[in-house]
């Protein structure tokens, strides 16, 4: 687990064990905010230690950027925290969280002591502003990677925690390409010194516009290419011809996971666009290849 101090009062913790997952800590004069947790308890304990050192009686909050296990399962290690999330996040955790945690424990013994923690304060619609003395946190919907996505903008420091709507490669298998495009366009309106993605290295001010544009270009490209394959009646297997680098993302992105996530994006798009197309326009391949896409964080 890596710990970086990106401003005087803001820290970023990055998992060494799983896909460069990020969590954040904002130290405010009237509270401490943890933004997501890390996948394994021994990593999240590093965040717990910092919070204990800095607490001094201040209230503690956790904000979930979305419901996926690698961002939420460590919340039980902060028993006194108030957990804030989108209403859909709580719904998804209620529906899927216990089973997902059981399955994770069966595969990874180090998770044995974790329990599911549900959000306490829900963002139903619109934005939420959390004022904690010298820090103002603007919490707003950021769907696309998942429907329940939230982002957190620390106004005084101009630091944006984007959750998984920004990653080294956009990932839409559990989300929606149109929602992600709209969210990325919305992010352009913020003055950002540092953007902390859900996975991967923080992005500095001069790089932010290019990263956002690169993500939009990638999404436009894969939609265009998958539509073309469907119009030509090509089967789902043919999607392997669409290389990740031809769509603008380096193969080495996210420690080499980019090609795998890219293939999953293509399959998910193929199935959704095939289902939406009028029957007369579906190719034979589009009808025959309807396998469920696997999903990761």
Image (cartoon, rainbow, N blue to C red):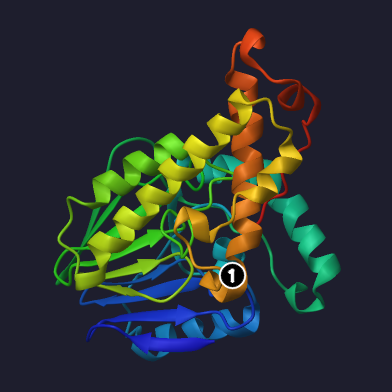
- The residue at the point 64 percent across, 24 percent down is 274
Residue 216 x, y percent position in the rendering: 36, 48
Residue bearing the label numbered 1: 74
Q: Is residue 215 above or below residue 141?
A: below
Estimate how packed mark 1 is, as few (under 14), some (14 to 19) or many (20 or more) residues with alpha carbons within 10 Å: many
Residue 113 x, y percent position in the rendering: 73, 74
Q: Quadrant of residue 137?
A: bottom left
Q: Is residue 222 above or below residue 297?
A: above
> 221 or 101: which is nearer to us?
221
> 148 or 130: which is nearer to us?
148
Residue 128 appearing in the image: no
Name, please, the residue furthest toward the bottom: 53
Quarter the C terminus occupies: bottom right
Q: Is residue 87 above or below residue 163?
A: above
Residue 119 x, y percent position in the rendering: 50, 52
- The residue at the point 62 percent across, 13 percent down is 281
126 on left or right of 233: left
Residue 122 x, y percent position in the rendering: 42, 44
Quarter the N terminus occupies: bottom right
160 on left or right of 134: right
- The residue at the point 53 percent across, 38 percent down is 225
Q: Is residue 279 above or below residue 238?
A: above
């Amino acid at each position: 687990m890596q710990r970086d101090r990106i401003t005087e009062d803001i820290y970023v913790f990055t998992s060494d064990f799983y896909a460069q997952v990020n969590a954040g800590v904002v130290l405010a004069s009237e509270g401490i905010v943890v933004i997501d947790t890390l996948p394994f308890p021994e990593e999240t304990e590093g965040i717990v230690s910092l919070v204990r050192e800095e607490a001094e009686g201040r209230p503690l909050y956790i904000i979930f950027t979305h419901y996926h296990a690698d961002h939420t399962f460590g919340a039980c290690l902060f028993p006194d925290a108030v957990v804030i999330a989108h209403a859909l996040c709580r719904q998804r955790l209620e529906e899927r969280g216990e089973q997902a945690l059981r399955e994770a424990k069966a595969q990874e013994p180090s998770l044995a002591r974790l329990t599911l923690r549900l959000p306490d304060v829900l963002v139903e619609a619109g934005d939420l502003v959390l004022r904690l003395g010298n820090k103002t946190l603007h919490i707003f919907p950021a769907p696309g990677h998942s429907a329940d996505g939230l982002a957190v903008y620390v106004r005084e420091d101009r630091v944006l925690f984007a959750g998984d709507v920004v990653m080294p490669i956009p990932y839409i298998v559990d989300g929606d390409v149109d929602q992600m495009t709209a969210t990325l366009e919305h992010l352009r309106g913020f003055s950002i010194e540092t953007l902390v993605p859900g996975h991967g290295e923080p992005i500095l001010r001069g790089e932010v516009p290019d990263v956002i544009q690169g993500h939009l270009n990638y999404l436009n490209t894969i939609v265009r290419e998958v539509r073309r394959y469907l119009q030509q009646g090509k089967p789902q297997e043919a999607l392997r011809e669409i290389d990740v680098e031809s769509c603008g993302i380096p193969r080495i992105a996210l420690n080499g996971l980019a090609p795998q996530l890219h293939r999953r994006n293509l399959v998910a798009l193929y199935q959704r666009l095939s289902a939406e197309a009028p029957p007369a326009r579906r190719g034979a391949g589009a009808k025959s290849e309807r396998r469920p896409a696997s999903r990761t964080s």
